[in-house]
Image: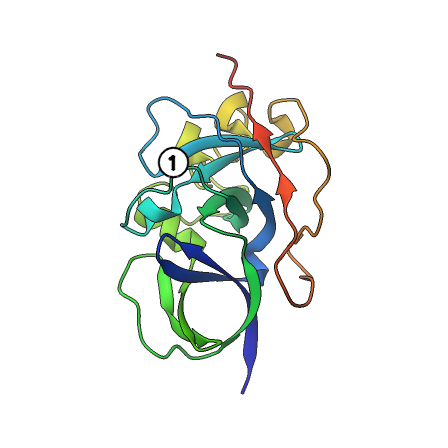
Amino acid sequence: MTHRRALVFPVDDGAFGLTVDVVREVVVAPRVTPVPTTPASVLGVCNLRGVVLPVFDTGRLLRGAPLRDPAFAVVVRCWGDDGALVVSALPTLAAVGEQPVQPSETPGTAGTYAVDERLVTMLDPEALIAAAGLGHAGAADGPAGTGPGSAVAGSAGPGSAVAGSAGPGSAVAGSAGPGSAGAVPGGPVPAGGPVGAAPAGPADTGG
């Protein structure tokens, strides 16, 4: 049987997963700066090594209870930009089959799979964010509002969540701290066990 590699993590009482091809890295204890007037599904923004990322409340995106004081966030690639989904505990790597054991009905989910004698619902991050009205499909160089950063500022990239420009290069200056240990740069993931995580600091919103 063919398997895919995925990060598996809890959100409240449920088990969810993301295929590793959409995962950039895992952030420990993200320090989130709230942004006024954003939807309830957007916790705010965080500064990851100088790049400002929108941080989404995965519990609310899944039509459940909000996540308070999230322990970790998974940085995902959506429409050519990065955004962070908060989770309840450190994700672990797992092998997921190609076919779900049952469908899933919540918008943004992509079926339920058997993983190590438990059921894990896989997420499609673009569909999950779009279902909440926080972004829509589009190319990385497409019109304003296509990426996850548009949930915060209505622009094309996460860097513009605060700085008001089109890409992460214009993100608020300032480092998030030490480099990422065990980062997942859209490619190889360490084999077995939990994934290492990088710290992220608060974003300077200028207020």
Q: Can residue 154 be seen in this snapshot? A: no
At 66% from the left and 52% from the top, the residue drawn is 196
Mark 1 closeness class: few <14, some 14–19, many ≥20 residues within 10 Å: many
Question: Secondary structure under badge 1?
Answer: strand
At 30% from the left and 57% from the top, the residue drawn is 107
At 60% from the left and 35% from the top, the residue drawn is 200
At 56% from the left and 61% from the top, the residue drawn is 92
Residue type at the position of mark 1:
Val
- Residue 150's spot in the image, x, y percent? 43, 34
- Compared across the picture, whether 1 is left or right of 184 comes to left
From this view, report whether residue 55 is shown above or below residue 138: above
- Residue 173's spot in the image, x, y percent? 65, 22
- Residue 26's spot in the image, x, y percent? 59, 48
- Residue 153's spot in the image, x, y percent? 43, 27
Which one is in front, 157 or 27? Answer: 27
**Can you tell which quarter of the image residue 102 is in?**
bottom left
**Can you tell which quarter of the image residue 192 is in?**
bottom right
**Which residue does the numbered mark 1 point to in the structure image?**
42
- Compared across the picture, whether 89 is left or right of 63 comes to right
